[in-house]
Amino acid sequence: MTARSIMFMGTGSDVGKSLLVAGLARAYANRGLRVAPFKPQNMSNNAAVTADGGEIGRAQALQARAARREPITAMNPVLLKPEGETGSSVIVRGQRRGSYKARDYWAKRHELLPEVLGGYNELAADCDLVLVEGAGSASEVNLRSGDIANFGFASAADKPVVLIGDIQRGGVIAALVGTFAVIDPADAALIAATLVNKFQGDPQLFDDGKQFIAERTDRPCLGPIPFFADASKLPAEDVLALDQLPRGQGAYRIVVPRLPRISNFDDLDPLRLEPGVSLDIAEPGRPLPPADLIILPGSKSTRADLRALREQGWDIDILAQHRTGTRVLGICGGYQMLGTIVFDRDGVEGPAGTSAGLGLLDVSTVLGATKELRVEAATHVASAQSISGYHMHMGVTSGTGLDRPFARIGNAADGAVSADGSVMGTYLHGLFAADDFRRSFLSAAAATSTLAYERMVEQTLDGLAAHLERHLDLDYILGLAR
């Protein structure tokens, strides 16, 4: 039997679609339904490795976890990973197809609709309910032709839509009503209801607003859903969330330079939630503040971000602080930057060329088109603590620095450590989610830590599901699905 489904679109980006789908996935899973999340097309440099050996957007991996399912590539058939101002790496069913300028991709994206529908049908054949998330704004009529992310998918698959507006932005009434005014009537006919999200205050004060929206759109207006304060405890997908996340007030100071093409920044989530840690995301235009630990994060374009790091003068800050005892850790692209040189002879991440690294590790990297995508169970060499992480990188790293590995994966070595142990590099993403390793790595800063990160994520998802049960008629929403 084919599953029922319903799609959630927004009047704009960051209106809470991803979080809403995650909460509904957990809520309906708690009711005994077999649920699957689905996003036809996503744009994010925060990705996750799937059980079937590909990659999808981090939000869909979290939604799969909420649904108590393994993430698979069918849940996000098309993933765009921005590489610059006007181009992206295009991932289809978890594998890289190549890099495209935005104009070229938009002209051809309709050709990916069969891949999108195929992913959806695969999920629908194996569950009771598919919760579909749109992308960006539903009212971008200039991008409607060839669309596969919003009404293009909803129309092709004949799926009902709930249109979400964020009241915190202001103008939510105009945003919801105005969407109906600008989109094609055939698309508007797919909208079954509107929904007001992120409300703060007395909800009765919005009763007249709900009535106005319902009258002008001829659709029921659901909610308002009160703002869910614990959302910051969950992994974020959009890099814009870095501006809003709490970063702690602990005595142990971790500084992360905000690189233009930062990726997989959810590696930092367990650190910012540690009570003994303060995590500072250093913005361009200011020097790196004094730190106990500097982390160079993952990057979608190592050489371009290495150039940006030097333009900010952060290379000087890193070297100066390292000389005075600050530890330095590079993760994935950040690890590559810590070496002596990065080669990109074939232009894998941009224009072909070679860049000098920071020279803190005796390794060099040759970038290549083959991407390593694996879930890994590793052991940290220095502490013997277990790490559950994943590899998601392009490039082969070599050099004498590998004789002192950061971790071991079975009989294989991962990463490198300087002779004095103060500089470390690893390809392992997600390493800090392992509680015992994280506490050992942070030493005295987390000696009294009680943070159980994975358990906290589960508790937060359960709390989100309960929040939606209180403030939405989930039976009604399920009744809209078809």
Image: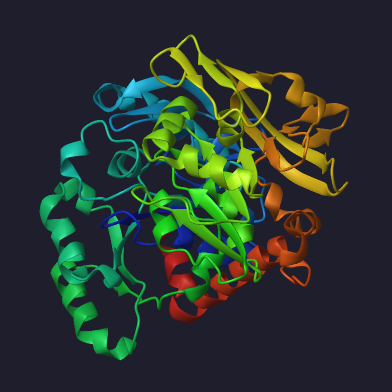
Q: Left of 231 or right of it: where is 403?
A: right
Q: Depth check: 416 or 24 in front?
A: 416
Q: How many marks?
A: 0
Q: Depth check: 379 or 148 in front?
A: 379
- 167 w.r.t. 4: above or below: below
Q: Depth check: 166 or 109 in front?
A: 166
Q: On the rendered image, what quadrant is the N terminus found in?
A: top right
Which residue is rendered at x = 61% and y = 33% of the image? 335
Question: Quadrant of residue 379 in the image?
Answer: top right
Q: Can the viewer see residue 66 in this picture?
A: no
Q: Left of 255 or right of it: where is 447?
A: right
Which residue is rendered at x = 29% and y = 72% of the image? 168
Q: What's the image's color scheme?
A: rainbow
Residue 73, position as x, y percentages in the image: 57, 35
Q: Can the viewer see residue 145 in this picture?
A: yes
Q: On the rendered image, what quadrant is the C terminus found in?
A: bottom left
Residue 109, position as x, y percentages in the image: 32, 27
Which residue is rendered at x = 40% and y = 20% of the image? 350
